[in-house]
Image (tube, rainbow, N blue to C red):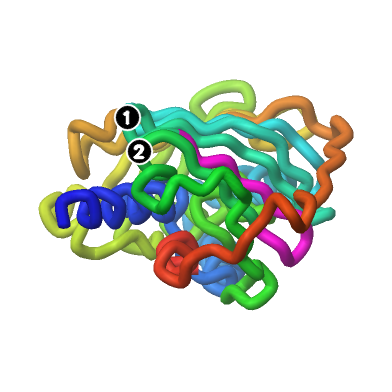
Amino acid sequence: MKTRRLATTGVALVAVLGLGLTGCGSQTGADASADRGAATASASPTAEPAAELTAAIQRLNEQSMRVKVTSSLLTASGVADPPARTLDVTMSLGELGEVHSLVVGDDAYLKLSGMLGKQLGGSKKWLHMDAGKLSGGQFGFMPADDPGGVKKLLSAVVDVRRTGDRAYAGTLDYTRTGADPKSLAAAGDKAKAVPFTATVDERGRLTVFEVDMAPINPMLGTMTASYTDFGAPVRLSKPAAADTEEAPAELARAFTRGS
């Protein structure tokens, strides 16, 4: 029973990180947030910075890139090509082990090592899920069309201001991100004023997004998503059939929760 509970906890952490950079809201909500943000910004002195930040985040869908996410709980790095719906990212969760995520079109694959792998039967094969059947085509912590989960945070932006050349700061209302309400309950109103900073490059693309999660839980510290190597070729292929098996239903539900 103890192993079972650990496995469930680990999978839930990997899947959505309740308080992680990915808000895990619906794709429709994420797209609608840009319009809502623009409407709010038009009557606000922060209109121009808000529009610039929105554009910088949306430009992440235009070409391939290398992505890295770091926090006190995890590190994740890899490559993504949103227009081609491909992604290859490895996430390290310390003593829980690693999760290797691969997305090629409508097919998503996981390979788990360490404690997570052992708790799920110790299979060394890729675990397959049909990403095309998911709501919005989303998949876990690193959706192919939103690596790092920053785009989904647009719905939570309360205010944004310029702090320097291509630099921004503001606050997020984390209750709007789709994060598990139970995870936010202890923070109370602090969850509605979570600080963030952002940096864009000379071509207006987001390069760094940092969220100070301490107001919600001091253990979370700062979570950072960074983007580099824009336009570099990303050539990914599906694993051989002999090296894959269908993911257990419970695992699939955990990794697609909130999608």
Can residue 236 be seen here? The reply is: yes
Q: What residue type is labelled 2?
A: Met
Question: Closest to the observer: 32 or 127?
Answer: 127
Residue 108 point in image, percent of width and height:
66, 58
Question: Closest to the observer: 32 or 236?
Answer: 236
| Residue drawn at the location 34% of the way across and 55% of the way down | 12
Point out the image quarter for the N terminus.
bottom left
Q: Whole-Å distance between the Cαs marked 1 and 2?
A: 7 Å
Instruction: Write down the quadrant of residue 205 in the picture.
Output: top right
Q: Would residue 197 be found to the left or right of residue 67 on screen? A: left
The residue where tag 1 is placed is: 95
On whether residue 99 falls in the magenta region, the answer is yes
Contact between labelled residues 2 and 1, with CB atoms less than 8 Å apart:
yes
| Residue drawn at the location 32% of the way across and 29% of the way down | 95
The residue where tag 2 is placed is: 115
- The magenta region covers 98-108
Q: Would residue 99 be found to the left or right of residue 144 on screen? A: left
235 relative to 54, above or below: above
| Residue drawn at the location 85% of the way across and 34% of the way down | 231
Question: Closest to the observer: 220 or 141?
Answer: 141
